[in-house]
C-alpha cells in the first residue's frame, strides 16, 4: 500500500502543480472560463461574474500550492481534505458540463491541453480515485524534507505564485498556448489542409406514409421511399477537421475586410474586445502609438465587438485617429489578453503582441 500511496501522491501532486501553473500563466483566460460557468445557462451565479478574475487567481494559486504541500508532506490531514473537497466540486462541475453540454472546454489545463467535457470528467474521476487512496492512507504521507522547512516552502510558493500572477496580468502570459501566438500566420491557421477529415452526419428523414409516420436514416442522400416528406434532422456523428483559427474576421457595415487586411505588409491592430471594459490608462496611451505607426507607413485599425456608437465616443474622448472594425468577442479575447492590446502583423503573420503597459516596446 505504501508504494500505491507514493505513486498516487506524485501523480496527484504533479498534476495539481501543472494544472495550476498553466492556468496561473493565463489567469484572465481562466476567468473567462469561470464567467461561462457563472452564466445563467450553466450555474446561474451571475453575481460572481465581476469577481471572476480574483476567484480565478485564488483558485489556481491554491491548486498549485496544494500540489506542493502534498509532495513535501505538509499538513497531510488538511491537504487531503482540501484535495478531496476540490475534486468533488470539480467532478460535479465537469459532469454537469458534459452531460448537459454547457461548456465545451472545462479549462482544466488552460489552453495548453484542451479537453472535451467528457475527457475532463473522466480525468476528474481518475483523480478522485487517487485522492481517495491518499485520503484513507494519509499515514503513509511522510515528509520528504525537514518539517521545519515546510511552512517556509509553502510561504515562498504563495509569494512566487502571486508575483507571477501580477506579472502576467501587467504584461501578457509568459507562454502563449493559443492559436494566435507570435509567428502564426492567420491565413494558414484558417485554412483546411487537403485531405483533412470532413464532418460526418446522419440525416433522419421523416415521412408520412398511409397515415403512419416513419423515419429513414441516411448519410446524406434523399431516400427513395414512398410517402409525403415532413422534415429532416441532422445528427453529428463525427467531427471533421477544425482549423486552429476558425472564428476570426474583420467587418464593417456588413462588408468583410479580412482578406484585404491580411495582405497588408504593415498592419497594426488595436484590439479591445469590449471598449466598455477597456482600461482607461491603456486607451490614453494609444494615441502616441497610433501616430507613430502611421508616420512609419503602417495601416492602423481598431478591432472591437462593441457597438458603433461606443467606438465613436471612445475615439473622441481619447483623441484616437482610428477606424474601427467589428470582430467576434471570443476571437478578440483569444488573440490577446489585454484590453486594449497591440498586435503587429505583416501579410497575415503576427510579428509582435503587446500589453498596453508595454506599448513603448513596439518595434516599428
Image: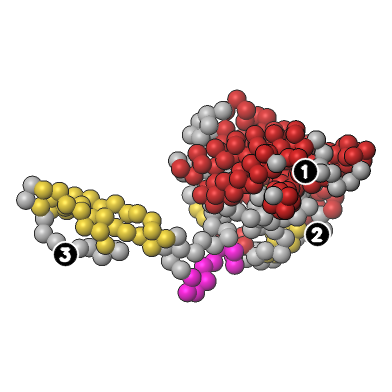
Most distant residue in the front direction: 1
Identify the element where label 2 is drawn.
Answer: loop
For this orientation, the residue located farthest to the top is 47
What residue lies at 25% left-to-right and 59% top-to-bottom?
217
- Kindly state the secondary structure of the residue where label 1 is placed: loop
Pointers 2 and 3 in contact (CB under 8 A)? no
Label located before the other in sequence (3 or 1) = 1
Q: Which residues are magenta?
A: 187-196
How many numbered tags mark residues here? Answer: 3
Q: Position of residue 176 (x, y in %)?
A: 72, 55
* Alpha-carbon span between mark 2 and mark 3: 64 Å
Check disc 2 and report the residue beneath it: 364
Q: Would residue 215 appear left or right of 177 to someone viewing this image?
A: left
Q: Nearer the viewer, residue 130 or 204?
A: 130
At horizontal 65% and vertical 65% (from top left) the residue drawn is 185
Residue 77: percent from the left, percent from the top?
75, 34
Name the residue that disc number 1 marks.
141
Query: Which marked residue is nearer to the observer: mark 2 or mark 1?
Result: 1
- Camera-side residue of 348 and 176: 176
Q: Which mark is residue 106?
A: none
Q: Which residue is mark 3?
A: 224
Amino acid at each position: 500500500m505504501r508504494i500505491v500511496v507514493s505513486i498516487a501522491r506524485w501523480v496527484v501532486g504533479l498534476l495539481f502543480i501543472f494544472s495550476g501553473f498553466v492556468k496561473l500563466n493565463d489567469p484572465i483566460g481562466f476567468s473567462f472560463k469561470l464567467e461561462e460557468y457563472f452564466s445563467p445557462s450553466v450555474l446561474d451565479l451571475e453575481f460572481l461574474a465581476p469577481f471572476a478574475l480574483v476567484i480565478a487567481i485564488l483558485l489556481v494559486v491554491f491548486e498549485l500550492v496544494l500540489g506542493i504541500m502534498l509532495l513535501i508532506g505538509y499538513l497531510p490531514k488538511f491537504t487531503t481534505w482540501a484535495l478531496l473537497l476540490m475534486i468533488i466540486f470539480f467532478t460535479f462541475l465537469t459532469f454537469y458540463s458534459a452531460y448537459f453540454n454547457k461548456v465545451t472546454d472545462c479549462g482544466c489545463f488552460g489552453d495548453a491541453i484542451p479537453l472535451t467535457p467528457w475527457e475532463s470528467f473522466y480525468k476528474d474521476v481518475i483523480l478522485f480515485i487517487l485522492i481517495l487512496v491518499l485520503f484513507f492512507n494519509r499515514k503513509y504521507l511522510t515528509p520528504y524534507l525537514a518539517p521545519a522547512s515546510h511552512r517556509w516552502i509553502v510561504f515562498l510558493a504563495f509569494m512566487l505564485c502571486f508575483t507571477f500572477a501580477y506579472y502576467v496580468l501587467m504584461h501578457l502570459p509568459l507562454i502563449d498556448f493559443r492559436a494566435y501566438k507570435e509567428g502564426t500566420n492567420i491565413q494558414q491557421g484558417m485554412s483546411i489542409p487537403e485531405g483533412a477529415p470532413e464532418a460526418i452526419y446522419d440525416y433522419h428523414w421523416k415521412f408520412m406514409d398511409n397515415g403512419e409516420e416513419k423515419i429513414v436514416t441516411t448519410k446524406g442522400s434523399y431516400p427513395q421511399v414512398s410517402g409525403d416528406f415532413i422534415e429532416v434532422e441532422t445528427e453529428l456523428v463525427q467531427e471533421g477537421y477544425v482549423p486552429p483559427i476558425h472564428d476570426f474576421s474583420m467587418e464593417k457595415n456588413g462588408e468583410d475586410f479580412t482578406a484585404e487586411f491580411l495582405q497588408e505588409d504593415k498592419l497594426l491592430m488595436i484590439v479591445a474586445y469590449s471598449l466598455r471594459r477597456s482600461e482607461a490608462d491603456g486607451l490614453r496611451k494609444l494615441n502616441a502609438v497610433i501616430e507613430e505607426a502611421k508616420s512609419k507607413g503602417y495601416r492602423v485599425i481598431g478591432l472591437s465587438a462593441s457597438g458603433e456608437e461606443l467606438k465613436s465616443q471612445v475615439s473622441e474622448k481619447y483623441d484616437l485617429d482610428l477606424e474601427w472594425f467589428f470582430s467576434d468577442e471570443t476571437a478578440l479575447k483569444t488573440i490577446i489578453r489585454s484590453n486594449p492590446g497591440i498586435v503587429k502583423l505583416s501579410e497575415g503573420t503576427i510579428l509582435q503582441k503587446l500589453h498596453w503597459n508595454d506599448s513603448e516596446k513596439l518595434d516599428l
